[in-house]
Image (cartoon, rainbow, N blue to C red):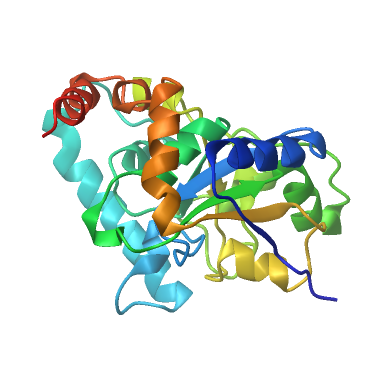
Amino acid sequence: MTNQLKTETVNSFSELLNQIEEFQAGTEVSWYRGCRSEQFKLIPTLFRHSTKKAIDALLELESTITTRFVQRSIPYISRALVDDWDKMFFMQHYGVPTRLLDWTENPLVAAYFALEENPKYKTKNAALWLCDPIKWNRSALAHISYAGGVLDQTSTIVANHRPGTDVGDMPSTPVMMFGSYNSSRIVAQRGVFSLFGKSTDSIEDMYAAGHYAQDCVKKIIIPAVKVDEIRGSLFRKGVTESVVFPELDGLAREIKRTYGY
């Protein structure tokens, strides 16, 4: 049996909040991801390579990228990267391709990314994705009768998702997990993650295939003509660049926007 992905269109900030409230009312925990184009798929950066599509080649590439990053990052970091998990989350923080897909526990942070000003996508509808990570994990791990919640790297359940795992031993499905809070940015953004296995299908395609709890994934579409208006409402609520990026770079972005640059 397949799942029908529930999709709603909103035309105002209040409608967006109502959709978030409705989703939260049916969940114990809810996660969010903002995409500036509704056409973006829920797949990690590692799987977006222009030519490498087979999982064997992608996992080999993951190993190569990790080795190169660790070798060349030594002069720029103040501590040793202690294990494979530490390397993966540290790389994700700096935008290096991994099997991690970013989410946030804060819907307004996700809305910021969905509504981010970008001339390249001026005519594109934006999207806010909503996910119940507990329902997802319980569906993904139903074969072991999993009844827990969000995972983390200390759990033996995610051991075979670990970088370096042989493709034959790696599970297909992504799992929802907490990561290392290794920067002020991830703290501010309330960052959480999907960790993908050997399936390169997107989360929405896996959900539609029907192996996951009904309504554990939802999509909200923000029409292109409403993006500027709803972004303005979001800024007036105090969700601005310096809040999402609590560094000098975020403050600089906010000042440039405020004064018309």
Tell me, yes or no, if residue 114 can be seen here. yes
Tell me residue 176's x, y (percent). Answer: 63, 45
Tell me residue 243's x, y (percent). Answer: 36, 21
Quadrant in the rendering for residue 209: bottom right
User: Residue drawn at (34%, 37%), measured in percent from left and top?
Assistant: 93
Quick check: 23 left or right of 251?
right
Tell me residue 248's x, y (percent). Answer: 18, 20
User: Residue drawn at (19%, 31%), measured in percent from left and top?
Assistant: 257
In front of the other: 195 or 110: 110
In front of the other: 132 or 171: 132
Question: In this rendering, is residue 4 above or below 143?
Answer: below
Quick check: 117 left or right of 154?
left
User: Residue drawn at (84%, 56%), measured in percent from left and top?
Assistant: 142
Tell me, yes or no, if residue 169 can be seen here. no
Question: In this rendering, is residue 26 above or below 10?
Answer: above
Tell me residue 31's x, y (percent). Answer: 62, 39
Quadrant in the rendering for residue 25: top right
Q: How many marks?
A: 0
